[in-house]
Amino acid sequence: MQVVVLGRRRRLAEAGFTVVELLVSTAVMMVVMSLATGLLLESQIQISRVQAELRNPLPRYALARLRHDLEGAAAVPALLPGWRAGRLTVVGDEGERIVWLSMGNELYRILVSVDGAEISRQRILGDVVSWRWRRLGENLVDIAFRVRFSRAVGAPRVGVPSGMTATTTVRESRLRVWLRRGAP
């Protein structure tokens, strides 16, 4: 009967984890948690970037407006192949011209009458970093513009008292339009 009692005491003394095992498991958990925290902060920053871009509908509006003008065009200038950074002039059904032009850091849509008088000037997009277009073959126009987005990100930063930082992202939007009416 004494053998059984000693066996139980020995098993009770061996139950649980040693200090070394606890230290190793704690260190492993700390490494895993620090990696998970970094990934979580990075995903928060990405989510805030996407939300900021979705809150700014102007690039999508500019693309839709460009598509509408190009699809309804009677003529688009046929130039040598290659990208152009200057004005894009589209001729409408009744001879009026729609001029897309980047001035400074803004993109404008200018409607010009048949006799050359400016009818309207619309500022379509601001914070434009670059604007370019090209003809691809007879019936295809390729357009690209880059827009700067600025926003405050609330991710914690070391050494910044409030934790808020201003970040700037430049995104490129592209549009390729098949001209329904063909080249002039």
Image (cartoon, grey):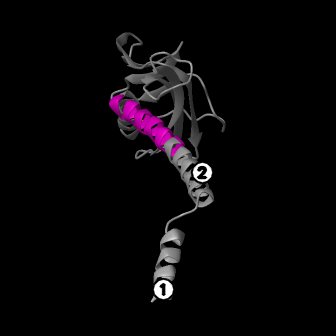
Q: Is the magenta stretch mostly helix, strand or loop?
A: helix
In three-dimensional space, the C-alpha distance between marks 1 and 2, rounded to whole angstroms, equals: 41 Å
Q: Report whether 78 appears left or right of 92.
A: right
- Residue type indicated by callout 1: Gln
The answer to if 54 sits in the magenta stretch is: yes
Near-viewer residue (167 or 108)? 167
Q: Image height check: is 28 above or below 107?
A: below
Q: Which mark is residue 27?
A: 2
- For residue 136, which quarter of the picture? top right
Q: Can residue 183 be seen at all in this image of the molecule?
A: no
> In percent of the image, x 57 and y 39: which residue is there?
135
Q: Nearer the viewer, mark 1 or mark 2?
A: 1
Residues drawn in magenta:
38-57
Q: Report whether 104 appears left or right of 72.
A: right
Q: Residue 2 carries which label?
A: 1
Q: The residue tagged with tag 2: helix, strand or loop? A: helix
Q: How crowded is mark 2: few (under 14 residues within 10 Å), some or many (20 or more)?
A: few
